[in-house]
Amino acid sequence: MIWVTTLGLGTLLVWTIQAAGLIQPIFRLHPKLKELRDCDFCLGFWVFLPFVLLFNLNLMDPFYFPVFSEIVTAIAISFGMHIGRLGWTQKFGYFTFDDEE
């Protein structure tokens, strides 16, 4: 159940960070921050990493290497959600908020 909660909350948080108008000025501070916002995979890693650390999630379960296991788990979750989002977008399309014009 904790995995479903993590995936759901993390995906919603990634979408909220990308779409929320109140925090858009933060992404205009530096070009790298704008790139981070536009990349689901990159932003997903930084969103899922605290969840992985908070809930002690580990995809390499019989083995545990401090820090490395958490990073690998966050990368794998972020990549899986990124691929899932690409598939969803290909199948059903998507809606964007264009406020930069």
Image (spheres, rainbow, N blue to C red):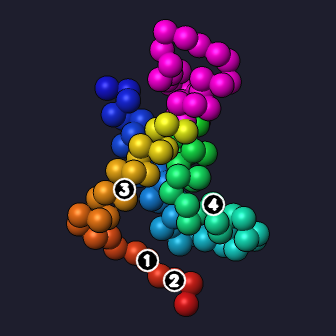
Residue shown at the point (48%, 14%) measured from the top left: 61
Tell us which disc is closer to us: 3 or 1. Answer: 3
Marked residue nearer the N-terminal end (4 or 3): 4
Q: Which mark is residue 36?
A: 4
**The quadrant where residue 67 appears:** top right
Estimate the spatial distance between the alpha carbons at disc 4 and disc 3, rounded to whole Å.
Answer: 16 Å
Estimate the spatial distance between the alpha carbons at disc 4 and disc 2, rounded to whole Å.
Answer: 17 Å
Q: Which mark is residue 85?
A: 3
- Residue type, numbered disc 2: Asp
- Label 1, residues with CA under 10 Å away: few <14, some 14-19, many ≥20: few
Residue shown at the point (39%, 51%) measured from the top left: 83
The residue furthest top is 62
Question: Percent from the top left, x then y, of residue 89?
Answer: 31, 64
Residue 25 against residue 33 in the figure, above or below:
below
- Identify residue for label 2: 99
Marked residue nearer the N-terminal end (4 or 2): 4
Tag 3, which secondary structure? helix
Asked if the residues shown at circle 4 and circle 3 are in contact, with their CB atoms under 8 angstroms apart, the answer is no
- Identify residue for label 1: 97
Tag 2, which secondary structure? loop
| Residue 87 seen by the camera | yes
Tell us which disc is closer to us: 4 or 1. Answer: 4
The answer to whether 72 appears left or right of 83 in the picture is: right
**The quadrant where residue 70 appears:** top right
Marked residue nearer the N-terminal end (2 or 3): 3
